Image (cartoon, coloured by chain):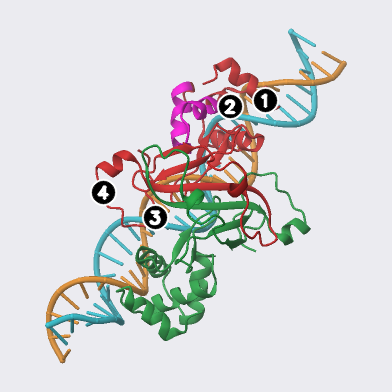
Chain colours: A green, B red, C cyan, D orange
Amino acid sequence: MPSSPEIEQILRHAQLRVTRPRIAVLNAVHEHPHADTNSIIDEVRRQLGEVSHQAVYDVLQALTTAGLVRRIQPSGSLARYEARVADNHHHIVCRACGAVADVDCAVGFAPCLTPSEAHGYAIDEAEVIYWGLCSSCSASPVDVTATIPATHTH
Amino acid sequence: MPSSPEIEQILRHAQLRVTRPRIAVLNAVHEHPHADTNSIIDEVRRQLGEVSHQAVYDVLQALTTAGLVRRIQPSGSLARYEARVADNHHHIVCRACGAVADVDCAVGFAPCLTPSEAHGYAIDEAEVIYWGLCSSCSASPVDVTATIPATHTH
DNA sequence: GAACAAAACTTGACTCATTCAAGAAAACAG
DNA sequence: CTGTTTTCTTGAATGAGTCAAGTTTTGTTC
């Protein structure tokens, strides 16, 4: 969890201008991995007072393009962001409550990045999402007949 | 590509009532794998004349729940459907044009379905999406700086 | 094969995450 | 400090998807 001056350095090193919304957004993503855009907006406003949602959308886009955060969007979920970008890890998503957990890439780069047949595509990333039920949702059964996973967070 | 009476049988075997919209939708998904909802609506209307979009949404939901079609939704893309449901295959998505191709599951069920650490989740599916550029987009370079893949189809 | 209950479809309004656009404010190079 | 560029604010718009009430159709039962 980088301190505020560290966050500032991260932005500068990425050649991004340092602004309060950017510091707050990057901070929020570090503190709340897999948070969706609305949660990030809330958290940023908690830190700074009123900030336009558009600013947060712009910042998230800029940070994503700069490679400082990564955007994930499991089917049926809103866009979520995480600051863990250095490695190639994957995610487990709960079908019932939408909770997301990280999983290290089990098999390194080999079977994980190489499909059996690439159809002429130049592949640069293998994204893996494991679907299932988190421990608390396994414990307290709900209706999971729908194939489309729930949208809300924990 | 099942014929119309075959489509009807498929519906009956799934204990679904046979209606013209359902036949047309299931037909469209068979004929246009990975088509998004709007394309399916267009195709269904080409077959039947006017059909409400709501009917198509309802049918797709019913077919998905019955396991006759599978819904996929790569980040930044609209919901897409495919009728290939019997096996565990994966997808390659072009970052530039959004084109989707099938890939057989390269590694069987083992590394493909087993994460290194399940965090207490009961996992039932491993979804893999390979990201890259399709052959035509590799040939005619466009701007691919954005991390969020394009929404439109070919 | 008519009548009935359940399931599907139509219509039309609505939601809400995300985007667009134009002007004001802030960052930073010189 | 000044100017240019980038970022932020404001407010409206977009559009995939959902909701809800009423009508039609399906398939079953008599």
The residue under label 2 is which amino acid type? Answer: Arg
> Whole-Å distance between the Cαs marked 3 and 2?
33 Å
Classify residue A16 as left or right of residue A80. left
| Disc 2 element | helix
A131 sits to left or right of A109: right
Residue that label 2 marks: B22
User: What number is the disc on residue B142?
Assistant: 4
Same chain under badges 2 and 4? The reply is: yes
Which amino acid type is marked by label 4?
A: Val
> Which of the two labelled residues, at mark 2 and mark 4, occupies the earlier sequence position?
2
Report the residue marked by disc 3.
Answer: B148
Instruction: Tell which subunit mark 2 falls on.
Output: B
Q: CA distance from mark 1 to mark 4?
A: 46 Å
Query: Could you say where residue A117 lies in the image, as x and y percent from the top left?
Result: 44, 38
In magenta segment, residue B27: yes
- The reply to whether label 4 and label 3 mark residues of one chain is yes
Q: How far apart, in angstroms, are the residues tagged by discs 4 and 3? A: 14 Å
In the image, is residue C25 above or below residue A69? below
**Residue B154 appears in the picture as rendered:** yes
Residue pointed to by mark 1: B17
**Disc 4 or 3, which lies upstream in sequence?**
4
- Mark 2, residues whose alpha carbon is within 10 Å: few (<14), some, or many (≥20)? many
